[in-house]
Amino acid sequence: MRVYLHRLGCPKNDVDADYIAARLTHDGHVFTDDATEAEAIIVNTCGFIADAKEESIEAILELAEYKTAGTSKSIYVTGCLSQRYGEELLAEIPEVDAVFGLGALDDLAAAIGGQRQRAAFLTDARSLRYLGYATRQITDNLPYAFVKISDGCNRRCSYCAIPSIRGDYRSRPIDSIVNEARFLAEHGKRELILVSQEATLYGNDLGKKGGIVKLLQALDEVEGVEWIRLMYLHPAQLTGDLISYIASSANKTVPYFDLPLQHINDRILTAMKRHSNRAQIQRLVESIRKVAPAGTLRTTFIVGFPGETDAEFGELMKFVEEVEFDRLGAFVYCAEEGTSAAALPEPVPAELAHERLDQLMLLQQDIAMTANKGLIGSTRDIIIDRLDAADQAVGRTQGDCPDIDQEVIVRSPDLEVGQIIRAHIVDAQGYDLYGQMVED
């Protein structure tokens, strides 16, 4: 059967889609990039925040029109939204043939094979059996791949619904991750980006103290992998040993510190249930800058959290101005059903919250532009992600994660995707850097 798989959400959700594709390919189904050619359509949804839920619903309704028009026989829904609202989706969208919870790959395969009736096949999200290197589908020629090292979360931040969707934190065994890394390297992946809800907690549930460093050390031995990038370092769990390992040039892990802080004001951090405070965060930032002066420090913040005052937002702005983060993302608070923050009083008006977001991002833009100009004249390692023309390629430094950070445009003939080169930075325009390849 010809299948079209519509992907939505974060890199972790996209990895889940790779496993779905592999499971169905194993049964002999063929995937198409054109929904009009598909006999079966799968929408792999996101259900994290309101905007993501809305986007998922719109995608389901749009793609359901192909079934109504008779070009597709069936449409199925998977992912976080179906895990969270499976029965409601079936009741409200009659075109949907079935919905499937996280990791319900066998049920989905059976449905496409005609062995399941219209129903919601949900899971308790406690099993990671669907994660395995032999069942991963590779559908691109990018030089990097996201690898899930765990699922779920134990933190229970007051604004986040992830634990109710994906369950408690479960680490994936090191052997399973290493096997998949080898598989990916054999298929041309030179950078592995390790994703989870919280990397710093890896291995604790398996009784492995310092488990994340042990995992990085094991991945260091995988032939063909040149860069390893670790995402989502919770400030309450980041240890000196992990900072030192990431900072070291003696291993393949790039000195990239993805440290989502969410805020800096103590009262708001407490209300967010972040298990960290300003003093701890300042010590942590100082430690990273001291141990890894050439490293990249990335963070995210939430503005407009219930009760956030002008003074508390001003404290955040002053902190960002002082620290000068290398990379920064920010979001307006969104009240999520079932979270404790949704019941907090004094909601910040949407217009004011968006004004604060604009102020913060304009501040960071000035910081980033100044930093980029300071890179002119330096030489950096660049991994080539894609070729735009015969003599132009687009790549990234070790301080840039794909999709969320900036790029480097390199003009040079005969470059190849996946190639790691030395480039001299000759110009900076906005968030883009321009480089010239340095010959060996």
Image (cartoon, rainbow, N blue to C red):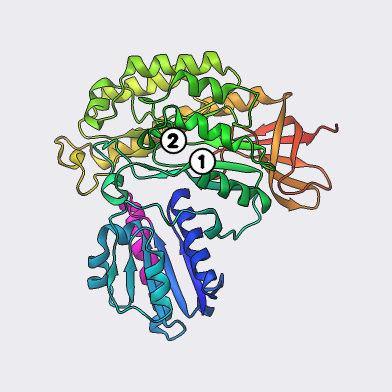
Residue at 23%, 26% in the rendered image: 270
Local SS, label 2: helix
Label whose residue precedes the other's in the sequence (2 or 1): 1
Local SS, label 1: strand
Residue 100 in the image, given as x and y percentages of width and height: 34, 65
Q: Is residue 429 above or below residue 57?
A: above
Residue 241 in the image, given as x and y percentages of width and height: 49, 20
Instruction: Give the dominant element type of the magenta stretch: helix, strand or loop.
Output: helix
Q: Which quarter of the image is occupied by the C terminus?
A: top right
Q: Which mark is residue 199?
A: 2
- Marks 2 and 1, how far apart at CA: 8 Å
Q: Which mark is residue 194?
A: 1
- Whether residue 59 appears in magenta in the rendering, the answer is yes
Q: Are marks 2 and 1 in contact (CB under 8 Å)?
A: yes
Residue at 31%, 25% in the rendered image: 313
Residue 204 in the image, given as x and y percentages of width and height: 37, 33
